[in-house]
Amino acid sequence: MIKSLLKLGLLLLVCVLGYNYFFGTEAEKEQSERIFGKVKDVGKDAWALLKTEKEKYQEGKYDGAVDKVGNTVESLGDLLGSLSRTAKDLNDSGALDRLGELQAKQKELENQLAGETPESYDAQKQERVSGEVQDLLRQTEELMKDMEKE
C-alpha cells in the first residue's frame, strides 16, 4: 500500500514538474529546470559511484566478506562445542538435544560457505546466510540463558 502511494506521489510530482516545465510561468519553468538539473546530477553521481564500486570489487574490496562470515560460523562451532561439554557435565539432556540441532545447523552453514568464492557470493546469498547466522546466534544465546538458569 505504501509502495503504491509512493509511486503515485512520484508520478504526480513528475507530471507537475513536466507541466510547469512546458506550460508554467517563467518562475515555474526556471524552478522545474533547476529540479531536472539536480536529478540529472544525482543520476551522474550514482553512475559514477557504481563505476567506482565495480572497480573496487574487481580489485578485491569484497573478497574478505566470505572469510568473515566463515570465521563467525567457525567461532560459533567452537562455542557450541564448549556448551556441549558443559551440558554433558550437567547431565542436561534437553540442552544436549538443542545443542545437537544447533551444531547441525552450524555444520550446514559451514558446508554452504565451503565452496563459496567472492565472485559467487552475491548480495542475495550474503543476506540469506547472514540471516541464518543471526538466527543461529540468537538460538545459541537463548540456550546459554536457559543453561544459566539451571
Image: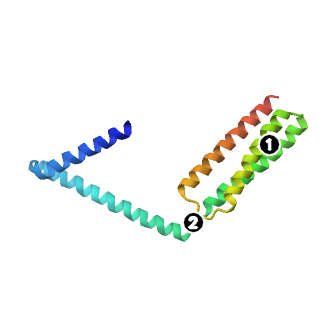
**Mark 1 crowdedness (10 Å alpha carbons): few <14, some 14-19, many ≥20:** some
SS for dot 1: helix
Q: Position of residue 61 (x, y in %)?
A: 55, 65
Q: 11 or 87, which is in the foreground?
A: 11
Placement of the N terminus among the 4 image quadrants: top left
Residue beneath the point at 74% across and 54% down = 74
Q: Which amino acid does label 1 sit on?
A: Gly
The amino acid on which the numbered mark 2 sits, given as a three-letter code, is Glu
Q: Which mark is residue 119?
A: 2
Number of residues whose C-alpha sits closer than 10 Å to that of mark 2, classed few (under 14), some (14–19) or many (20 or more): few
Give whichever of 118, 35 is nearer the camera.
Answer: 118
- Pick whichever of labels 2 and 1 is earlier in the sequence: 1
Residue 71 sits in quarter: bottom right
Query: Residue 37 at x, y = what percent?
Result: 24, 58
**Which residue: 83% across, 42% down?**
84
Q: Is disc 2 in contact with disc 1, using a CB cutoff of under 8 Å?
A: no
Please give the residue where the numbered disc 1 appears in the rendered image.
Answer: 100
Position of the C terminus by quadrant: top right
The image shows residue 22, relative to residue 145, as above or below, that is: below
The disc placed on residue 89 is none
